[in-house]
Image: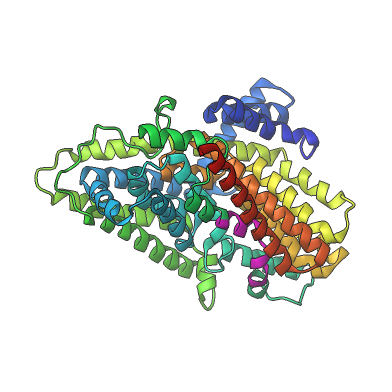
Amino acid sequence: MEGEFYSLIPAILMLVLVLLTRKVLLSLGAGIIVGALMLHNFNILETMKEVGIAFQNIFYHVEDGFQVGNLYLLLFLLLLGIITAFMTASGGSKAFGDWAIKKVKSRRGAQLMPSFLGILIFIDDYFNSLAVGQVARPVTDRHKVSRAKLAYFIDSTSAPITVITPISSWGAYIIGTLGAIFIANDVTTYQPLEAFVKMIPMNMYAFAAILLVFLVAIFNINVGPMKKHETRAIKTGELYDEAKGNIAGDLKTTISVHEHGKIMHLIIPIGVLVAGTIIAMLWTGYLGTEGQATILSLFENTNVNLSLFTGGLLAVIVASILYGFQKRPKTNFFSIYKEGIRSMLPAIYILILAWMIGTIIDRLETGVFLAELVEKAAISPNYLALLLFIVAGFMALATGTSWGTFGIMLPIAAQIAVVSDVSLILPAMAAVLAGSVFGDHCSPISDTSILSSTGAGSNHIDHVITQLPYAFISAFAAGVGYLVLGLTGLVSIGLVATLATIILIAFLLVISNNKKTA
């Protein structure tokens, strides 16, 4: 069943179960088991072995050895939980919230804060997702902004900004990939960096998603399930559905807040986390670069997960020292460490199962099947970008990985463009990048979405479900843009059409909302 239509079944089953049950662990587990059964023609013993291998591969792969990067990321999540616990116990989060409530005096301002932070922290999507949540959550909580909406702001700025920024982990990876593609297809018209910069305005979805985030923040646009979360938050102060059990990144009341906490007890650990991570990224990039080091080579060769772990460890040490210097702390160190680790376990469970089903889907060659559909499709070259945007979106949705979709679809997009019309090579590859981010935003097994839920302290499935309408609005606008690009051949007109569509839809939603409240 590998590389055939049937390879879509585990991904589709998982998505349907997520929508019907809202239970992510159950849905992921079902997808893993069904996929393993399909791989081994429903042989129970071999299926059990396959599931065991999928779990083992997270930590140790027979061909590649220990998966140190995965271990670093999991450890970083635990460290982030401990940092959060210390910032709470020290009173730093409360002090920052008290200060911010005086500076940020409206829900609009509270919603704009994570939106702007999401744009400013463009170095890496993982780092963005977790750092923005830690800084913005005290403010959005005070203004009764639901955790689901905060997660949307984080998720819908992190990947879109990193995918269009050359100086980021995503940008460096894409630029490196472009270089290999150009060599393989004898394309000498562009240099990789030049091509990436020219592709930026062709990434219609990224601009649509970012613009929609700010319109949602400014005009308080609540679409679909988001209305329920926002209404509950405003009326009751309940920022998430407490009946759904533990929320990743959220602390229990077992930690007592120090009454003399200061803003520095939050700002200094976060500052150390940011500075330590960025310095570690530059250093590991320097160590991994052969020959002359440039800013692009540093980000291309950086070890993001090791850098996150390094920054997190330094921040925990600093937060521990600051707490130790406080007079009469109410909670002992062991309880803080324990509670911080406990708060991150839901995210780790989801992440591990997401990695496992990603391995199963990869073995079923779901991505290969979708890629072959594109190669066989008889479509006018003018609409190649639109087709690639749709297919890349579905592939990222099914597989839960933008980068995996890049790796499969970018070379195929280039090959098709070279054969049909070489002038379409940049729009075709830009459409792949755009579709990959769109699919990533819709997938419950996306790393970035999981970490955005964690950073916001939101139930993960609530985040996925509430973000879907906004992602589809942005995707529709991007589709309009790629259609206009196909009709006119002008990137500028296509981008204007995308942004105009977003503004028009937002305007209609605001009018509709005003009529209902009148």
Tell whether position 186 is magenta: no
Determine whether 288 is above or below 63 in the image: below
Residue range (magenta) = 197-211
Which quadrant holds the N terminus? top right
Q: Is residue 57 visible?
A: no
Tell whether position 199 is magenta: yes
Residue with the most extreme top position: 44
Left or right of 91: which side holds 221? right
Count of numbered circles on the image = 0
Q: Toward the viewer: 449 or 308?
A: 449
Q: Which residue is at 41% across, 27% downward?
A: 245
Residue with the most extreme front position: 518
Quarter of image, res 4: top right
Left or right of 13: which side holds 290? left
Q: Toward the viewer: 453 or 26?
A: 453
Q: Which residue is at 24% across, 46% downward?
A: 94
Q: Tell me residue 264's x, y (percent).
A: 22, 57
Quarter of image, res 54: top right
Q: Tell me residue 457's x, y (percent).
A: 40, 40
Residue with the most extreme left position: 327
Q: Toward the viewer: 254 or 472?
A: 472
Quarter of image, res 256: top left
Q: Tell me residue 380's x, y (percent).
A: 88, 57
Determine whether 388 is above or below 341 in the image: below
Scheme of image coloration: rainbow
Determine whether 45 is above or below 249 in the image: above
